[in-house]
Image (tube, helix red, strand yellow):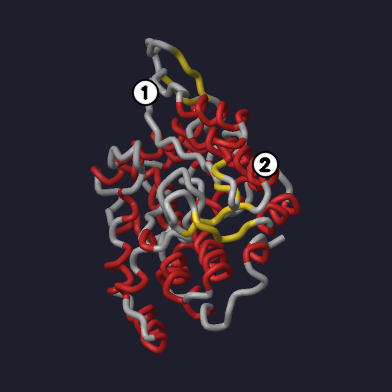
Amino acid sequence: MDIRTFYHTSVPDWLLPFLEVPEMHRLKDVGMNCGCEYTALPPLRKIHSYSRWDHSVGTALIVWHFTEDPKQTLSALFHDISTPAFAHAVDFLRGDHQTQESTEAGTLEMIRSSSSIRSLLHPLGLTAEDVGDYHRFSIADNVSPRLCADRLEYSCGNIIQFGFASPSEIRSIVEDLAVGKNEDGEEELMFRSLETAVSFARLALKCSHVYVSDGDRCAMQTLADLLQDALREGVLSTEALYTTESRVISALVSSRYRERWEQFCSLSAVFCSDQPGETGDWRIVPSKKRYIDPFVLRSGRVSSLDSGFALQAHQFLELSLDHWIRGI
């Protein structure tokens, strides 16, 4: 089932050519789960293909559904266009564990340098500057933990991927959405019913726990270390990271890094401890804590309306990631 039809019944004709420009097509081979899906760690070992292209198209359709504005829609479509192979694992490589924003750099420049995108923008009367920063549009993106198209799409996608809810449940959640004004008078995606808002918030929080789990953090750091060493020794180039995951993996397995890649893929469990063990590669790995606290139309945020969710969100934010971990 294509969940993009939940966001909008079909892709508008004017948008179709943008989906297949080379810069977007590359994202079909860049995954949403930052390389963790190549491991044998649960729940990632059971997920199906979910690419940055899938996510970007879904995000654009959400924005189009609620705004019918090509400028905002294209900004949403292009928001991950500069994402490297393995996405946020490269943030870990760069030491950007806490914000995970270093991979966003270069979006506007990539659009500017694309003759294919520029030629499609011109008939719409748009420039690269018009669509190069989705942070300008509150439906596409806003300050965490508010709900926006970007967070909605990857949450819905991963809720299904991780088996936390069925596609039909996600459809019901999406159908309850509207656009309203939040406590700051800013437009925001929000829910009509408290029950649906609470259901979504709790499901998204389950995903949040996966994103900061020992397994996820261990996998991303292990992959980051592998990539960093391969870059240092010339097995990979920085430019190669901006191709596809298939090409990066091919370069690794055809080099002396084959065994390390296979060891990464065989990760199936993680040990944790208050102190590092005497053997093995023990480390403390920080991570960005992301969650969503949606607004209910004319009522307020879920955290102010449902004490159970407020407690769960507080416990998540207080979750300690200061222990030592080691993958096997």
Q: Which residue is tagged 2?
A: 199
Q: Position of residue 146 (x, y in %)?
A: 48, 47
Q: Residue furthest bottom?
A: 123
Can I make out residue 201 in this image? yes
Numbered disc 2: secondary structure: helix
Amino acid under label 1?
Ile
Question: Between 192 and 95, which is closer to the camera in this rendering?
Answer: 192
Camera-near label (1 vs 2) is: 2
Residue at 67 percent across and 66 percent down: it is 5
Numbered disc 1: secondary structure: loop
- The number of numbered badges drawn on the structure is 2
Residue at 28 percent across and 74 percent down: it is 113
Residue at 62 percent across and 52 percent down: it is 191
Question: Between 126 and 26, which is closer to the camera in this rendering?
Answer: 126
Amino acid under label 2?
Ser
Question: Between 264 and 48, which is closer to the camera in this rendering?
Answer: 48
Residue at 31 percent across and 40 percent down: it is 96
Question: Between 71 and 311, which is closer to the camera in this rendering?
Answer: 311
Can I make out residue 229 in this image? no
Q: Which residue is tagged 1?
A: 284
